[in-house]
Amino acid sequence: MKELICITCPRGCHLKVDDENGYKVTGNSCPRGEVYGVNELRNPTRVVTSTVRTDSAETPRCPVKTNGAIPKGKMFEAMELLDGVVLKTPAPLGEVVIKNLFDTGIDFVTCKAVE
């Protein structure tokens, strides 16, 4: 039996996931908690947020994030990929910075327009 705190919403339900009996989840207040509990034990994923350098003296860094969740074990590898990126400006909101991370179909995109 594993104990988790659900991060799907601000409620923060205290979940118990029975990984020995078909991943039965208890303690959730909504169906999203059950999905989170099962996924967290089978294949944990996270949205990654960071910044990248730009070629702009006015705005030397631009916030970026993945446009979906990637495998948790790939987070540090994804961050290392951002080290070599220098964003050419102007860059609109939502511009793809790194496409198709680890063949997941998930991209790093800008979270702010940079002029």
Image (cartoon, rainbow, N blue to C red):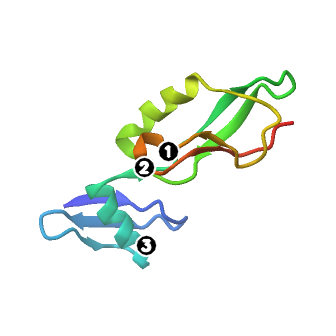
Whether pointer 2 and pointer 3 mark residues with C-beta atoms closer than 8 Å, the reply is: no
Q: Secondary structure at mark 1?
A: loop
> Which one is closest to the eye, mark 1 or mark 3?
1
The amino acid type found where label 3 is placed reads: Arg
Q: Nearer the viewer, residue 62 or 34?
A: 62
Residue 31 image position (x, y, % from top left): 41, 78
Q: Quadrant of residue 95?
A: top right
Task: Determine the residue positioned at 55% across, 64% down.
Answer: 10
- Work out whether 98 lies above or below 26: above
Mark 1 nearby-residue class (10 Å; few <14, some 14–19, many ≥20): few
Residue designated by label 2 = 104
Task: Determine the residue positioned at 27% across, 56% down.
Answer: 41
Whether pointer 2 and pointer 1 mark residues with C-beta atoms closer than 8 Å, the reply is: yes
Task: Determine the residue positioned at 55% across, 42% down.
Answer: 99
- Work out whether 64 lies above or below 53: below
The amino acid type found where label 2 is placed reads: Thr
Q: Earlier in the sequence, mark 2 or mark 3?
A: 3
Q: Earlier in the sequence, mark 1 or mark 3?
A: 3
In three-dimensional space, the C-alpha distance between marks 2 and 1, rounded to whole angstroms, equals 6 Å
Q: Quadrant of the N terminus?
A: bottom left
Residue designated by label 1 = 100
| Residue 32 circle label | 3
Q: Quadrant of residue 37?
A: bottom left
The amino acid type found where label 1 is placed reads: Asn
In three-dimensional space, the C-alpha distance between marks 2 and 3, rounded to whole angstroms, equals 22 Å
Q: Nearer the viewer, residue 31 or 87?
A: 87
Task: Determine the residue positioned at 33% across, 57% down.
Answer: 40
Residue 80 image position (x, y, % from top left): 49, 26
Q: Secondary structure at mark 3?
A: helix
Residue 57 image position (x, y, % from top left): 85, 21
Q: Decide if residue 16 is on the left or right side of residue 35.
A: left
